[in-house]
Amino acid sequence: MVAQIISGLAVAQDVKERVKKAVEDLKASGITPCLATVLVGDDPASATYVNSKQKTAKELGIATRDHRLAATFKQHELLELVQLLNNDPEVHGILVQLPLPKHIDEFAIINTISPLKDVDGLTPYSAGMLQNGMALLKPCTPSGVMELFDYYKITLEGKDAVIINRSNLVGKPLVFMLLERNATVTVCHSRTKELAARLRQADIIITAVGNRERFTLTADMVKEGAVVIDVATSRISGKLAGDADFEAVKQKASWITPVPGGVGPMTIAMLMKNTVSAASVLRG
Ligand code: GUN
């Protein structure tokens, strides 16, 4: 079997067109959705992500605030900034780019973001709502993965899904999203025994390791006809790649996401969608 390619670029474009229209409607009713991004420090990858988020927001007519702070910015100063944004009626979404510098308590910062403005879906409130199947704002990368399944009509009911990632950003939210769709979910991580054997049982593999020296998803780990969603971005001799040995895995899977052009573009599109959802709540 040769896999069909899941084009995150095409699906993200589709989502962004719908968001653009929703932004126009909101503006017509007197609300201009506004996304505030906060970047602390000078990590080049984080800066690139934030630049893309700012650029996409502007393209869709979403207003933005762009806070870029030195790596020495203090925790209490960051807490004050988040509070300021919480209390600013013109701001609908707050995104604090992670990771934060070591001297800052990431949980304390995330926990200060108003759940109403939590467009990253990372606050404990949003996480709890997601567990209960009640969340309005869900983490962007996992939502993007679900959007890909829906767009390509890949069914999840009764399927064995194996996730390789247990982070708050990706693995944990995916558990609840997949359970909601009646998949059977296994979460694997660095200490999992018999990883390859577990993967070979999977109808759906969602991999997000991001370090090809530690882990490569090879064709022998993939069941014939499995769906492979590659959330990772790493580099092989300077070239962007995911966890999967793409060309080999493509020969066995039924569907596969490329890297780049797979899940990546979806994360930003879903952030824009969340920003519009946060702003829409005001309209009632
Ligand atoms: N760092 C890597 N991915 C993300 C994300 O989706 N949101 C935030 N805030 N930080 C990240």
Image (cartoon, rainbow, N blue to C red):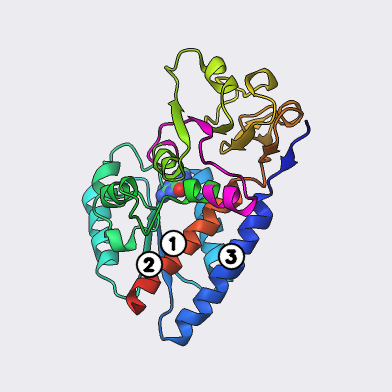
Query: Disc 2 or 3, which lies upstream in sequence?
Result: 3
What numbered label is drawn on residue 278?
Answer: 2
Residue ranking furthest to the top: 194
The residue to which callout 3 is attached is 16
Expressed as whole percent of the image width and height from the top left, the position of residue 82 reads: 28, 59
Query: Disc 1 or 3, which lies upstream in sequence?
Result: 3
Q: Are marks 2 and 3 in contact (CB under 8 Å)?
A: no
Q: Which residues are magenta?
A: 146-171
Q: How many marks?
A: 3
Magenta span contains residue 160 = yes
Magenta span contains residue 136 = no
Assign a secondary structure to mark 2. helix
Name the residue located 64 percent from the left edge and 24 percent from the top edge. Answer: 222
Residue ranking furthest to the front: 158
Q: Are marks 1 and 2 in contact (CB under 8 Å)?
A: yes
For the residues labelled 2 and 3, the Cα–Cα distance comes to 16 Å
Q: Amino acid at mark 1?
A: Asn
Assign a secondary structure to mark 3. helix
Q: Is residue 47 left or right of residue 68?
A: right
The residue to which callout 1 is attached is 274
Expressed as whole percent of the image width and height from the top left, the position of residue 149 reads: 58, 47
For the residues labelled 1 and 3, the Cα–Cα distance comes to 11 Å
Classed neighbour count for the residue bearing mark 1: other residues with Cα under 10 Å, few (<14), some (14–19), many (≥20): many
The quarter of the picture where the C terminus appears is bottom left
